[in-house]
Image (cartoon, rainbow, N blue to C red):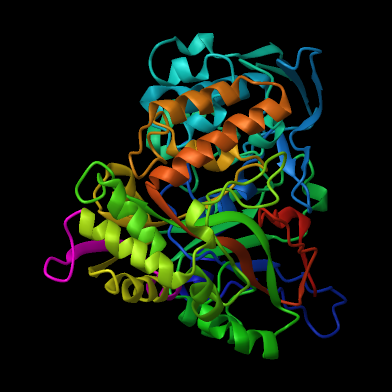
Amino acid sequence: MADSAIRRAAGVFAAAVILAGPFDGITPAAAEKVLRIANMGEPETLDPHKTSTTIEANILRNLFEGLMVLDHSGNVAPGVAESFSVSNDGLTYSFRLRDTAKWSNDEPLTAGDFVFSLRRIEDPRTRSQYAEVLYPIKNAQAVNTGKAALTELGVAASDARTVEITLKAPTPYFLQLLTHQSALPVNGKEVTRLGEEWLKPGHMVSNGAYMLDDLKPHSHIRIVKNPNYWDAAKVTIDAVVFDPSEDRAAVLKRYRAGEFDVLRDLPNDQLGWLRQNMPKELHIAPYAGIYYYALNTTKPPFNDKRVRVALSMAINRELLVERITTAGELPAYGFVPDGTANYTARRVPWRTMSQEEREAAAQKLMGEAGYGPNKPLRLQLAYNTSENHKRIAIALAAMWKKINVGIELVNTEVKVHYSNLRIGDFQMGRAGWIADYNDAQSYLFLAQTSTKQQNFSRFSNPEYDRLMDEASLTGDAGKRAALLEQAEEILLDELPVIPIYFYVSKNLVSTKIMGWRDNPLDVEYVRNLSLAD
């Protein structure tokens, strides 16, 4: 890649073309096909076992491939495993790896690599932000909490090409978990040999359709086609450049100037113009996720339930989605969206009240908590850089002013923001969650005491934890749904989080891209796309 640095320094990722003489009969080389994606944030890391955001997942699913992947519709499909079987009791899954599965350094990908990787994410020394998502694996929680040895994790290699995973209880959605970045394999030999250096260009060994070529913080990440990928012959896009810029309006201008092919989010105040002027490129679709505010329940005033409930009641969600977000989002009066598989979503009991009645009730609760016109409550609201998040925060601050709450806005870039949420350095913070699989547990686990990294509010309720734990061990779908519904009712009574709206995905996709399909998880693998000449 000797010329790539020159191209990048010029800000242009077009390929060099070999120029032939006018009569020598040589055909010019085809131009390199490069997909340019505005990813809307700086990734904290490219280590699959330490990530937590969709910003990172958009990159990682192209660098690495798990046992299972998602198809165009968001359904589970074979990945690096060509086939699998499940025991009659639903506890043991056997995955057969493809004969041609390799790492980008041309070494065979083996079952032992998956044993190493699954042990690594549950190893407490890894300090994974997402270890809990794989707790259905036998002894995973005990291993992750230091109560069992790594070798006791229910993962084994029966031979070089067969991975066996044993669960603690039948888990109908387990295959969906394996499509998540937490279940991606890493090369144990290189990770052990290089330490953190394995994450750098020139050192990273991956097994996906692409491999890491260049990484410049706050500038770009470039990945290039992996010639050793098992299905490399069908990969037509040569390189992908991910830009981390968070200013949606500026990025949109750059898209219109031809600098990007895909925008992974859009400024809400431009949606009307985009619907009128770029309808073929605008993709808005249902999205399995929720936009919410986390409240730090370990500190005043959010250790007082009355304050938490009052803030939630005072929000006019209908007005917010109609005038501020404007993309078809749905007001959220619960934490689990309607349409979630095998589940009847719960909703707050005051949903049927008028907005005037809610505001009156909220003022009364604030008065009981000791706040009012003569003693207003002052709060800091943290959000990650985005004009969309800022507009929402300003709108909510105006609504809360009616119940004598003053808001100071605190803005940081995305990786700093989420780091602050995880360590508890905030009062109230904006967050968003996209389901990892179509199940209520994918939302509700965020409030479990054991969910250390994602439970930003530090909510801890023994009965909630009991219901969630029992649901994780219940094979009967109806009984399991009932347990999860009871848990959501507790969450909506206590409100350590304020649900605001349920997402829609918003992408701008160039008409020269072929193969893009919207799906509820907003997942696209670049290997499935192609670019028109």
Where does the image place residue 331, in percent across and percent down from the top left?
A: 55, 64
Where in the figure is residue 435, as x and y percent of width and height?
A: 59, 47
Is 57 placed left or right of 480 in the picture? left
| Front-most of residues 85 and 530 | 85
Q: How many numbered discs sit on the rendered protein? A: 0
Where's residue 377, x and y in %?
Answer: 19, 63
Q: Residue at x 61, y 15 (%)?
A: 168
- Can residue 156 be seen in the rendering of this structure? yes
Residue appearing at x 72%, y 61% in the figure: 237
Quarter of the figure that contains the C terminus: bottom right
Magenta residue span: 369-390
In the rendered view, would you say 155 is above or below 21?
above
Quadrant of the drawing holding the N terminus:
bottom right
Q: Quadrant of residue 247?
A: bottom left
Q: Nearer the viewer, residue 104 or 320?
A: 320
Residue 283: image quadrant is bottom right
Asked where in the image residue 287 lies, by quadrant, the reply is bottom right
Above or below: residue 28 compared with residue 126: below
* Residue 43 placement (x, y as % from top left): 44, 54
Viewer can see residue 315: no
